[in-house]
Amino acid sequence: MKVLIAEDEGIAARKLTKLLMAEGLEVIKHCKSNAELKTYFEAKAEPELYFLDIHLNDGIVFEFLEECKPKSSIIFTTAYDEYAIKAFKQNSIDYLLKPIKTEELKTAIKKYKAQNQSETNLDLLQLSKLLHQKKYRERIRIKIGDKLKSIPVLEVKLIYSKEKITFIKTIENRSYPIDFSIAQIHTELEPSKFFQVNRSQIISIDHISEVISYSNSRLKVKLIDDKTEEIIVARERVQGFKQWLG
């Protein structure tokens, strides 16, 4: 981890550098004033973590913070406790009073690492979700004679099985056999758009005209511009179907 120290006392700076190196941190810069801090900030990439004394050669360090607004985290190191409230309004991890104790320094570094790790884990989790987000089928391949054709799923209002053959029915009320079982094609369709109402039928929510009560606590679904298909929601699927409808 690369860190920057702002400390105007040579002995204190050397002691802090030694403590940080013992913790495996790399001190990439030692500044003695706000001017040095500003010059480095404007010319170089920010360190991962700042260790800032509050009183420097040319004023208090808040002058640098208010002007440059660094984004990296800060651990304040100072002999004065009256600036604690102001310090915590910055992007600070901890406020260490001199003389700095090794255990307090270790605790402050652990705080930084824990905070940074939690943010990293969140980013990785979000990235993992994006990478593993399931891609649902957008088209279904059909065969007409010796020709292949691709039908957008948005144009499919019904998928059904008849005599061990699976068909899709389009918005033009034309049916085509497909090379998938009901169970297989169901797993490849977006759940918010398609619902398997019984063992042999899957319907599209975009092409429902009405849903009415039917015998034995079941439901009957009618599709837009379609009077030929009888679609009955199985009793054990009614509750899930209602939730799917919203």
Image (tube, grey):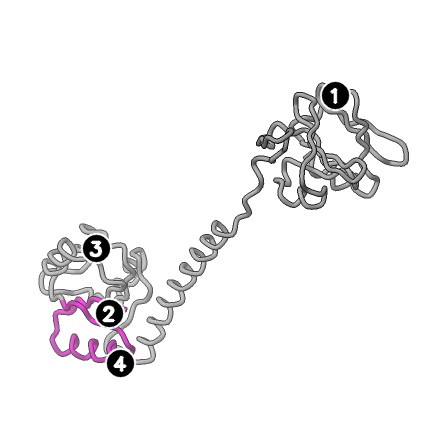
Badge 3: residue crowd in 10 Å (few <14, some 14–19, many ≥20): some
- Residue 65 disc label: 3
Name the front one of labels 1 and 4.
1
Residue 121 location (% of width, % of height) = 44, 60
Q: Residue at x 33, y 76 (%)?
A: 106
Q: CA distance from mark 4 to mark 3?
A: 28 Å
The segment highlighted magenta reads: 1-30
Residue 7 included in the magenta stretch of the image: yes
Q: Residue at x 68, y 42 (%)?
A: 180
Looking at marks 3 and 2 on the same chain, the residue that comes earlier in the sequence is marked by 3
Name the one closer to the observer, 126 or 170: 170
Residue 217 location (% of width, % of height) = 87, 36
Task: For mark 3, give the secondary structure.
Answer: helix
Q: Which residue is mark 2?
A: 77
Looking at marks 4 and 3 on the same chain, the residue that comes earlier in the sequence is marked by 4
Badge 2: residue crowd in 10 Å (few <14, some 14–19, many ≥20): many
Instruction: Give the image quarter of residue 64.
Output: bottom left
Look at the numbered discs 4 and 2 and tell me whether their residues touch, using CB distance below 8 Å: no
Relative to 155, is 31 above or below? below
**Quadrant showing the N terminus:** bottom left
Looking at marks 3 and 1 on the same chain, the residue that comes earlier in the sequence is marked by 3
Task: For mark 1, give the secondary structure.
Answer: loop
Relative to 199, is 119 above or below? below
Q: Residue at x 69, y 24 (%)?
A: 174
Q: How many marks?
A: 4
What amino acid type is highlighted by mark number 2? Thr
Horizontal side of residue 240 vs 50, given as left or right:
right
Name the one closer to the observer, 77 or 110: 110
Residue 38 included in the magenta stretch of the image: no
